């Protein structure tokens, strides 16, 4: 007569990277208690149905620890410096950074992937914004200007465009013009069109240290040397140019938000 077949239940368990079964916190607590009572490692292993290596591992660490997942390969690994610079350049706009990744590095990633990668810098920008004292100007005093870039599709072709953005400091009223370059002529035309659109000229214009407008800016002495043609342009229209401190574009945060 044939002997009946014994059916062995199959249990799926988590294992460590060395193949040992991971123990729940309760089992690890029992290991520690039995060890304090003088039980040996092999005896504890037999009692709890695990390997001596597992018992030794938990005793060495003094308690339960979650298993470590294998390290995942980062899609954007090695691009931290580029991501930080691009994220700041585009004023925290992760979608524009994603477009630049495709254009510059040929990487096609999701917006969520970029948002996870730039999270530390977003927190830093938020902290800097909170640490900056809000500065208000009276009506007609100040106009803030800057350029931003973005990629748009015209037909089926991606085109990189430059956006001249001007924002009044008091009312936040804004004007935007589109160019295909950021040379001095674009700055001048953008300002002239802004003045006509607003129907007047402010007392001062606040800007970054754009090469087309600023020849030199000594960060320590705070001495600014504006471009001669830009100074002549300012005298003609009757406004006082003013440059932000280097690496402190948030001084003109009203316009930075518009550019973003």
Image (spheres, rainbow, N blue to C red):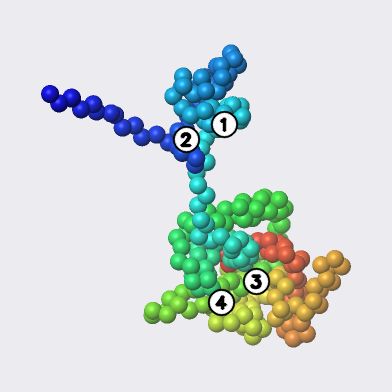
Q: Which mark is residue 57?
A: 1
SS class, disc 4: strand
Name which residue lies at 80% across and 73% down: 217
N-terminal-most mark, 1 or 3? 1
N-terminal-most mark, 1 or 4? 1
Nearer the observer: mark 2 or 4; the answer is: 2
N-terminal-most mark, 2 or 4? 2
Name which residue lies at 64% across and 63% down: 81
Nearer the observer: mark 3 or 4; the answer is: 4
Residue identified by numbered label 2: 20
Which of these two is toward me, 223 or 80? 80
In the rendered view, would you say 133 is above or below 206?
Answer: above
Query: Taking the image as drawn, is residue 89 in sight?
Result: yes
Neighbour tally class for label 1: few under 14, some 14-19, many 20 plus, Cα within 10 Å? some
Nearer the observer: mark 2 or 3; the answer is: 2
Residue identified by numbered label 4: 162
Would residue 163 be found to the left or right of residue 243 on screen?
Answer: left
N-terminal-most mark, 3 or 4? 3
SS class, disc 1: helix
């Amino acid at each position: 007569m044939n002997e009946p077949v014994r059916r062995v239940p199959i249990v799926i368990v988590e294992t460590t990277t060395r193949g040992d079964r991971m123990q729940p916190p309760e089992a690890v607590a029992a290991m520690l208690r039995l060890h304090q009572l003088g039980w040996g490692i092999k005896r504890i292993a037999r009692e709890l149905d695990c390997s001596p290596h597992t018992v030794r591992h938990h005793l060495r660490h003094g308690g339960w620890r979650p298993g470590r997942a294998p390290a995942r390969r980062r899609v954007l690994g090695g691009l931290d410096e580029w991501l930080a610079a691009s994220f700041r350049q585009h004023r925290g706009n992760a979608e524009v950074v994603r477009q630049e990744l495709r254009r510059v590095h040929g990487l096609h990633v999701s917006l969520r992937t970029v948002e996870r990668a730039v999270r530390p810098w977003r927190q830093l920008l938020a902290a800097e914004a909170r640490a900056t004292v809000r500065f208000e100007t009276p009506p007609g005093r100040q106009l803030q200007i800057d350029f931003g870039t973005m990629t748009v599709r015209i037909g089926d072709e991606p085109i990189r465009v430059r956006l001249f953005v001007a924002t009044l400091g008091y009312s936040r009223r804004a004007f935007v013009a589109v160019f295909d370059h950021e040379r001095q002529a674009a700055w001048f035309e953008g300002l002239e069109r802004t003045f006509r659109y607003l129907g007047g000229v402010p007392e001062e214009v606040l800007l970054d240290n754009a090469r087309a407008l600023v020849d030199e800016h000594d960060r320590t002495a705070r001495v600014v040397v504006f471009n001669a043609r830009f100074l002549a342009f300012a005298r003609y229209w009757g406004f006082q140019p003013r440059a932000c401190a280097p690496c402190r574009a948030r001084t003109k945060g009203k316009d930075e938000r518009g550019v973003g």
